[in-house]
Amino acid sequence: MLFQNLTIENATEPVDIRVSDGTFAAIAPKLEPQSGEEVMDCTGKMALPPFVESHVHLDTCMTAGIPRWNMSGTLFEGIQCWEEYKPRLTKQDVRDRVSRAIRMQAANGIQYVRTHVDINDPKLTALETILELREEVRDFMDIQIVAFPQYGILSYPKGAELLEEALKMGADAAGAIPHFEFTREYSVDSLNICFRLAQKYGKLIDIHCDEIDDEASRGLETVATRAYETGMRDMVTASHTTAMHSYNNAYVIRLMRILRMSGMNFVANPCVNIHLGGRTDTYPKRRSLTRVKELTAEGINVSFGSDDIFDPWNPLGNANMRDVVFMGLYAGHMLGYDEIMNSCKFVTTNAARTLHLGDAYGIREGNDANFVILDAPNYYDALNNNAAVLRSYRRGKLIASTKPMEKTVLF
């Protein structure tokens, strides 16, 4: 199939893309159609690699209001609401909810997902179910699973044993939540356990790190130091790091040195971070978003995630990465023209680095033909006009499509 006149990732000149046998066979201007080849004119449209959801909790999706709503809007009441829901967990419940969420993601051009799955459950019900789903949907979506100890590794009975069991079962990454451990000592020790188990089983690491407005919460310096000292570097991700919003600048200047040296990744979740953060403030109220602009300026890899889809931590959510980028740019003071144009990287190439997708990700000759077509000539227009993801292709096969909305003004 030949796609003509597509703009790739904000390039100034359009090119043609030939897809053959599920791969990008040729990418160049003005390719000649082959005999019998299907041709699609894409003038005024742009192509991007598929969107990458680098932080979401599929196991909790679609549970908002059951058995009750999070009325305070805090992280901690959300955790309590989830605890009250967990007796309802069955494999069928998880399968039904997650299947719906995955298809919402696919409709929005997402083909790669990193989901955190709560393993502070002796039965590991959600983990077992999502491991099964990961295999079932592999033809249209890649799912990475983080073994996430929601209540802590040392502050939950047999937390370390459950983490190890989850990694043995097939989770792709080890998680931790140092700011939720009972003590600072538990916090550091839990991170040491996380790194030890990840190295033992050859896994990635993704840590819920300092997701709190307390400027004294400084698990990040330990995570970065371990990433540096162990040599795991970009195999390590720190998610949230919202306490960094409250750190004093003198401390951040010192901290940046080990963050650069570590080579680790960061994930911000703009919509949910801003919703949950600043809840203890009167006025002024903190945004509680990590220092995306400053981290990016230091050459540190940052991606954006949705975090939650209609669950105790987010009563909204539609699995659309455009909303996440839109919020992140406003909250992060990143509305310069070039910043807007390049912001697609937060949910494409930067996020692909976070997931360790390597050179197999991207619109390049020889790669699998995984890409999306947006109803806009560039990402500035796509973001500003909420352009539809018209088509999503997986190994050259159409897996999702959308018709643009037609609007009529009657005056």
Image (spheres, grey):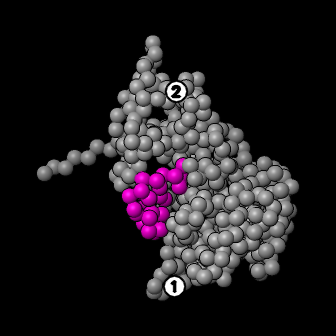
Q: Is residue 147 visible?
A: no
Q: Is residue 240 above or below residue 362?
A: below
Q: Which residue in the rendered view is the most extreme toward the top?
A: 35
Mark 2 — residue?
Answer: 26
203 part of magenta stretch? no
Q: Position of residue 291 (x, y in %)?
A: 55, 70
Q: 10 Å neighbourhood of mark 1: few (<14), some, or many (≥20)? A: few
- Left or right of 69 in this view: 410: left
Q: Position of residue 345 (x, y in %)?
A: 52, 52
Residue at left 56%, top 70%? 290
Q: Nearer the viewer, residue 318 or 249?
A: 249
Q: CA distance from mark 2 to mark 1?
A: 55 Å
Residue at left 70%, top 64%? 261
Count of number-bearing discs: 2
Q: Which residues are magenta?
A: 324-348
**Comes first in the chain, label 2 or label 1:** 2
**In this view, the mark in front (2 or 1):** 2
| Mark 1 residue type | Asp
Q: Secondary structure at mark 2?
A: strand
Q: Is residue 232 visible?
A: yes
What secondary structure prevails in the magenta region?
A: helix
Q: Is residue 237 above or below residue 14?
A: below
Q: Which residue in the rendered view is the most extreme toward the bottom?
A: 282
Q: Position of residue 33 (x, y in %)?
A: 43, 18
Q: Secondary structure at mark 1?
A: loop
331 part of magenta stretch? yes
- Left or right of 105 in this view: 409: left
Mark 1 — residue?
Answer: 281
